[in-house]
Image (spheres, rainbow, N blue to C red):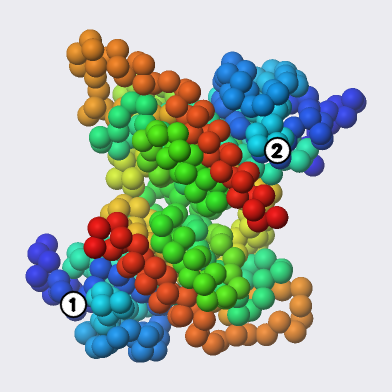
Amino acid sequence: MKESEIKYHIQMKQGDVGRYVLLPGDPGRCDLIAQSFDDAKLVASNREYRTFTGTLLGEKVSVTSTGIGGPSTAIAVEELIQIGADTFIRVGTSGGMQPEQIPGELAICLAAIRDEGTTMHYMPPEFPAVADMETTLAIREAAEKLHVPYRVGITQSKDSFYGQHQPERMPIADRLQQRWKAWKMGGAICSEMEASTLFVLGNIYRKRTGGVMLIAANQESKDPNAGVVEKLDDVIAVAIESLKILIEHDRRAAGK
Amino acid sequence: MAVRNLDGTQHHIHLKAGDIGGYVLLPGDPGRCEVIAKYFDEPQFVAQNREYVTYTGTLLGEKVSVTSTGIGCPSTAIAVEELAAIGAHTFIRVGTSGGIQPGTHTGDVAVVTGAIRDEGTSLHYMPVEFPAVADMDVVLALKAGAERAGIPYRLGITQSKDSFYGEIEPERMPVSEHLLERWKAWVMGGAVCSEMESAVLFILSSMYRKRASGVMLMSCSMDMAPKTEAEIAEAASLFDIHRAIRTAIEGLKVLIQNDKAKK
């Protein structure tokens, strides 16, 4: 495969993206995230893959949507790596899993539960889906700097949205509920649908990956008045700041 | 939580609250406990039963302990359950391992960020999809410890297996194809070392909200195997457990300082 070729799904070639890429699930959010870049331009839009490229601190950066779930995320990450991306931060929304989590807080994903099918096409399930330490630290530093409340921990990456939200109506209800209980007891802090695929591919291809999620709601909350937060400002601000921290760090490491 | 004896001690480790510090180093080999305890201030032998030997002392004025786990996750799970029940909050595994990635030199250490759950014990606790992941602050402290001790290190994932000879001599096992195929996957996934206890330590630590990581002394990867007599002698001298112990002790000091600063 040549880097100069236009990649089949993302419809981009080498040069179209920076090495740093933010990965939201929703194509509609790319426009919003790109507003935080300097000189952002729409580069491509095909299926659920929409990409803007701009700069931060003068360094080329991009945002590409993955669509929902591991299958479309794996395609995006494979093709982005082929055209030169090496640092990925997933930015998204998620549900809280621990009773004390308040909607509006952020979850910084250290690792992911591989509760999905895609990564089994790459790696036996015993292999841990862990994020890159340097990237995770940069996200934590960004949250501290911007005074956004956060927690660092494990995310559940699942294949079925409705299996999580309405397990009782599924033929395998007991299994879903039993496993949800195990994830909670294990200390998982959020539930979303893409991180584990990103992390496993990051390990295979030796690329840096991390994730920051808005806790949009918390079905486990002790507080019956805990509402739903859909404002993405904080999670986007932290993701952008994390990239700046990594860019500066990389420049120092390269002696620039 | 765990099972207690009539004298109030935990069933297997023969320890009760107060016998250990919050910070516990976990070697596999009971014979290494005394060696490690010599790095503590005022180390005292506390208990011994089966493969579980414990010494307690101090570092920077903070109470710390070392307890051996024996080989493998079954005995490690028992040690961690019982230590957590009597107040341990931070675990650092210290051991030996095989280096996996090409270019690994004998005597380098691995600072462990996560573990491949290639074992049976943690499945009695948690479905296989749950990641065995280390605590980030402990990892950072151990990384700083390696830098302070001047020991070359790799940060990464360990394979925690149940069968030592299945890794060393897979070709003679009835399930050889399965073992070889999986080993290839772990190498491609970037695993840095292979040992036998980390996965269950990490799963239990996530469940009980404790902190854990590990420092493993590595033997060289296959491509770096020593050939001449001089190389063989050099590798033998570098495969020195004190390199991992010094890293763990320096890392533990960094962690104790960081924890005190947070208070």
Q: Residue at 41% across / 45% down in the picture?
A: B156
Q: From this viewpoint, is residue B217 visible?
A: yes
Residue A148's tag is none
User: Does mark 2 fall on the same chain as mark 1?
Assistant: no
Going by the picture, which residue comes out furthest to the top?
Answer: B229
Q: Residue at 51% across / 65% down in the picture?
A: A140
The answer to whether residue B199 is above or below residue A93 is: above
**Mark 2 surroundings within 10 Å by alpha-carbon count, few (fewer than 14), some (14 through 19), many (20 or more):** some
What kind of residue is marked 1?
Asp
Residue A151 in the figure: left or right of residue B246: right
What kind of residue is marked 2?
Glu
Q: Rounded to the nearest whole Å, what is the CA distance between mark 1 and mark 2?
A: 54 Å
Q: Chain of mark 2?
A: B
Residue picked out by circle 2? B62
The answer to whether residue A4 is above or below residue B198 is: below
Residue A16's tag is 1
Q: Position of residue B211 (x, y in %)?
A: 62, 47
Q: Chain of mark 1?
A: A
